[in-house]
């Protein structure tokens, strides 16, 4: 039963599409994707950034310590500084998916 919303492609579907397009086995495509993801994690952790050509960039960012509020009590709390991972799309990728208004 669908709820009318489009669903993202599943890993099995992705492997099938890529194996058909590249004319290689699903096993080889899966091995490539796993190696690619491992490389992205390692490089982002090591260098603070990883670029996926034509798509975007994984970046480590450090947030500052700041004040916040507990929504339940309204009490002011300290939010500690932390490191987060962000993904930013390249302009060409954004425009390929959602063309700019003219």
Image (cartoon, grey):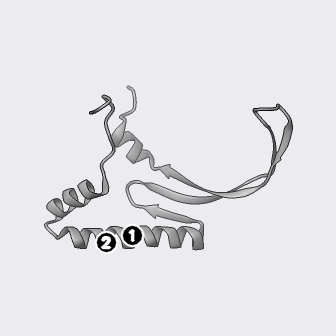
Mark 2–mark 1 Cα distance, whole angstroms, equals 6 Å
Q: Are marks 2 and 1 in contact (CB under 8 Å)?
A: yes
Q: Is residue 32 above or below residue 18?
A: below
| Left or right of residue 17: residue 66 | right
| Residue visible at 34% across and 40% down in the picture | 97
User: Which residue lies under the disc numbered 2?
Assistant: 32
Q: Nearer the viewer, residue 61 or 73?
A: 73
Residue 18, image quadrant: bottom left
Number of numbered discs overlaid on the protein picture: 2
The secondary structure type at the circle numbered 1 is helix
| Residue visible at 38% across and 47% down in the picture | 93
| Left or right of residue 68: residue 33 | left
- Which residue is situated farthest in the front direction here? 1
| Left or right of residue 13: residue 55 | right
Quarter that holds the N terminus: top left
Q: Nearer the viewer, residue 9 or 21?
A: 9
| Residue visible at 38% across and 40% down in the picture | 95
User: Which residue lies under the disc numbered 1?
Assistant: 36
């Amino acid at each position: 039963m669908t709820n009318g919303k489009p669903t993202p492609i599943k890993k099995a579907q992705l492997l099938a599409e890529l194996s058909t397009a590249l004319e290689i086995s699903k096993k080889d495509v899966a091995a490539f994707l796993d190696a690619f993801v491992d490389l992205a994690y390692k490089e982002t952790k090591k260098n603070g950034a990883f670029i996926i050509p034509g798509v975007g960039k994984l970046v480590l960012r450090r947030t500052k310590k700041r004040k916040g509020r507990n929504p339940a009590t309204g009490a002011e709390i300290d939010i500690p500084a932390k490191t987060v991972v962000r993904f930013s799309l390249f302009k060409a990728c954004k425009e390929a998916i959602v063309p700019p208004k003219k």
